[in-house]
């Protein structure tokens, strides 16, 4: 996520996953209020930042895997 420090991490993650903040909260298990606070401040714990990074990477991995399997 280092390359997107200038961009809001929560917003970026939601866009990459094609989900809302509410859905992000449900997927991650974080409270909606926590997600909202992180979006407002763009400051979140490193563990949460890593969690979001891995969610995006997992999505990209599964998309690539599905593409390979379909060929």
Image: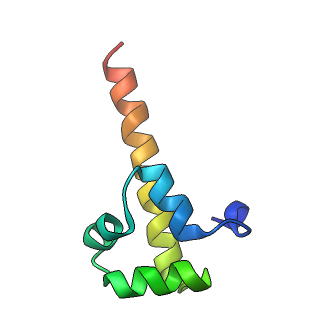
Q: Relative to residue 69, is residue 53 depicted above or below?
A: below
Residue that appears at 53% across and 74% down = 49
Query: For the C terminus, which image quadrant?
Result: top left
Q: Nearer the viewer, residue 3 or 13?
A: 13
Q: Is residue 66 left or right of residue 35?
A: left
Image point (51%, 69%), residue name? 10
Residue 36 position in % (x across, y down) = 44, 81
- Can you say which quadrant of the picture contains the N terminus? bottom right
In the image, residue 40 sits, relative to residue 18, either above or below, namely: below
How many numbered discs? Answer: 0
* 70, 37: nearer the viewer: 37
List x then y, in percent, for residue 9: 58, 69
Instruction: Look at 49% across and 51% down and name the residue there.
Output: 16
Tell me if residue 9 can be seen. yes
Establish if 7 lies above or below 56: below
Name the residue located 40 percent from the left edge and 87 percent from the top edge: 34
Lateral position of residue 21 relative to residue 38, left or right = left
Q: Is residue 57 visible?
A: no
Quadrant position of residue 19: bottom left
Q: Position of residue 2 (x, y in %)?
A: 69, 66
Q: Nearer the viewer, residue 20 or 70?
A: 20
Q: How is the image coloured?
A: rainbow
Q: Is residue 7 above or below residue 62?
A: below
């Amino acid at each position: 996520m280092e390359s997107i420090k200038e961009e809001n991490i929560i917003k970026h993650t939601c866009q990459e996953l094609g989900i809302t903040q509410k859905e992000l909260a449900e997927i991650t298990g974080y409270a909606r209020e926590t997600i909202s606070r992180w979006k407002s401040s763009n400051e979140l714990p490193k563990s949460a930042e890593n969690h979001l990074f891995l969610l995006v990477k997992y999505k990209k991995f599964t998309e690539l895997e599905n593409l390979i399997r379909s060929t």
